[in-house]
Image (cartoon, rainbow, N blue to C red):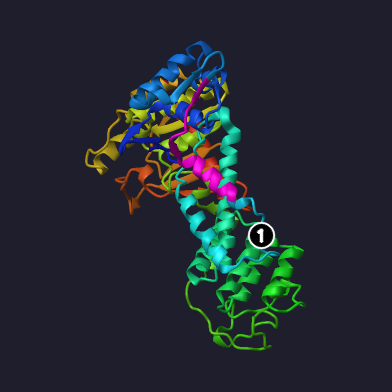
């Protein structure tokens, strides 16, 4: 069996138990061929993907065949039109994912209307778990000539994740229901909550069989919608609270709750408990009020990275390169990770080549290797610092119109990455008293990712910080 793994950042072909690595631009071409599932990829699409003339399509494919080695025969020349790949005896994770999720979704299911038997739900949980585990990266993530494929796989992943939550709720197993709650809470924290998210969270707590932390949950819903809770959410609350008259959660916002003031003997308004009796004392949970933290994060736009297809929470250069469509701004110490490894350099160069023609905006800021701050940083790091990235950055800036590089003579407080209009992130370099302890490489530190569309967007402050520093920085050509 020939096994093709495309749903990862570095596609691998397994032949007789041995891995065959596909490298560089060949990875993109290989994925494009496989994702067309035996259909022809035209010379024009190959040329667009590799930013070359159609007459060179054959040579580009030859590089793919060279990487495939003993499996080169799988690539077929459809003379006069393009190339395809034979997959008859191959296992392809991306195809299994697409077909598996599609099969489950053929049966439409509305958890607010339909019911699923526990046995059926457990079967779906098992299948969806195995399919979602295949996903390490969108198999079409860096294929600009196949944007529809990228969107299709993203949509399938979202649908699979949603359906998994539905199945977990109807499994009636505590462990699965808690996983569903965790996924729903994660969506809320990351600013992706929808009307269904809140309704499913209500159903999840109800399915768990434990007493719902209702006053907190209802206040969160009311605060989320501000003015008017949608009728479907109100109906779900009424069903969960077993009280058809429960229609106005905003009453809670003007009512003192035990979390806000009066301690263990606080009175909770009627209708807020699943066993509602007016003036029933509640036991106070003295743990950290996670709702307050969640709300602060929502208002400031502090989010996570998983739904943005970025590498964990570290924003390594390759993750940023894959994500960028038009704009990439970076500010750090010396940006060495972007040019120190040949394959990262190659990917970065490919991105810049594409953005040259699309009038992209790439700005890099680094510490001036000839300035006093660099000297001070060298002492603070006990000499563990190198300016070898400066010349490669100069070369890239000279070769690409989309890239500008500037230097500043100060110790940066943050590593900042801004991607297009939807990702602003920062990671602080370590500061201690009066000493600057920038011993940890910035890209290795977890980043805070900010939502530019938040009510009081902290993202704007970091964008302004970058712009202000940029305006006062020196072009790298001048040093």
How many numbered marks have been drawn onto this rendered protein structure? 1
Q: Quadrant of the C terminus?
A: top left
Percent x, y for residue 288? Answer: 48, 71
Residue 378 vs residue 50, the one in the foreground: 50
Residue 114 vs residue 140, the one in the foreground: 114
| Residue 264 among those drawn in magenta | no
Percent x, y for residue 17? Answer: 30, 39
192 is higher (above) or lower (below) than 250: above
Tell me the residue that label 1 is attached to. Answer: 196
| 404 horizontally vs 267: left or right | left
Residue 289 vs residue 307, the one in the foreground: 307
465 is higher (above) or lower (below) than 58: below
Q: How crowded is mark 1: few (under 14 residues within 10 Å), some or many (20 or more)?
A: some
The answer, for residue 390, to whether it is visible in the render is no
Residue at image x 62%, y 79%? Answer: 257
Name the quadrant containing residue 71: top left
Name the quadrant containing residue 282: bottom right
Element at label 1: helix
Q: What stretch is highlighted in magenta?
A: 83-103
Residue at image x 58%, y 35%? Answer: 149
Percent x, y for residue 112? Answer: 69, 64
The answer, for residue 137, to whether it is visible in the render is yes
């Amino acid at each position: 069996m020939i096994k093709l793994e495309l749903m990862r950042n570095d596609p691998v072909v397994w032949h007789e138990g041995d891995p065959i690595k596909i490298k560089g631009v060949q990875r993109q071409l290989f994925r494009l061929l496989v994702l067309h599932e035996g259909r022809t990829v035209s010379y024009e699409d190959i040329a667009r993907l590799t930013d070359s003339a159609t007459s060179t399509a054959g040579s580009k494919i030859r590089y793919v065949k060279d990487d495939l080695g003993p499996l080169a025969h799988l690539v077929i020349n459809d003379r006069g039109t393009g190339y395809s790949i034979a997959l008859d005896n191959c296992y392809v994770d991306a195809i299994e994912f697409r077909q598996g999720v599609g099969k489950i979704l053929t049966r439409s299911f509305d958890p607010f209307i339909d019911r699923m038997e526990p046995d059926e739900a457990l079967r779906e949980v098992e299948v969806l778990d195995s399919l979602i585990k295949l996903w390490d990266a969108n198999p079409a993530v860096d294929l600009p000539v196949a944007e529809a494929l990228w969107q299709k796989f993203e949509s399938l992943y979202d649908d699979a994740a949603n359906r998994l939550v539905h199945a977990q709720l109807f499994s009636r197993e505590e462990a699965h229901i808690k996983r569903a709650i965790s996924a729903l809470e994660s969506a809320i924290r990351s600013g992706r909550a929808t009307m269904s998210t809140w309704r499913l969270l209500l159903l999840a707590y109800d399915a768990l069989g434990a007493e719902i932390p209702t006053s907190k949950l209802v206040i969160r819903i009311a605060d989320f919608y501000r003015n008017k809770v949608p009728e479907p959410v109100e109906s779900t609350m009424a069903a969960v609270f077993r009280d058809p008259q429960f229609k106005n959660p905003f009453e809670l916002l003007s009512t003192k709750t035990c979390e806000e003031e009066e301690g263990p003997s606080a009175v909770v308004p009627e209708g807020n408990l699943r066993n509602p009796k007016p003036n029933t004392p509640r036991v106070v949970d003295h743990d950290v009020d996670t709702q307050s933290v969640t709300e602060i994060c929502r208002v400031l736009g502090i989010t996570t990275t998983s739904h943005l297809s970025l590498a964990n929470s570290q924003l390594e250069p390759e993750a940023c390169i894959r994500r960028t469509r038009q704009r990439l701004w970076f500010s750090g110490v010396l940006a060495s990770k972007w040019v120190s490894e040949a394959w990262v350099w190659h990917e970065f160069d490919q991105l810049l080549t594409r953005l040259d023609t699309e009038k992209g905006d790439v700005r890099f800021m680094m510490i001036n290797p000839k300035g006093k701050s660099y000297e001070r940083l060298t002492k603070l790091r006990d000499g563990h610092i190198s300016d070898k990235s400066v010349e490669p950055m100069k070369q890239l800036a000279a070769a690409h119109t989309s890239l500008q590089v500037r230097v500043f003579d100060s110790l940066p407080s943050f590593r900042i990455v801004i991607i297009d209009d939807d990702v602003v992130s920062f990671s602080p370099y370590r500061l201690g008293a009066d000493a600057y302890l920038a011993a940890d490489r910035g890209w290795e530190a977890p980043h805070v990712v900010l939502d530019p569309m938040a009510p009081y967007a902290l993202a704007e402050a970091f964008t302004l910080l970058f712009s202000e520093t940029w305006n006062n920085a020196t072009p790298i050509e001048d040093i």
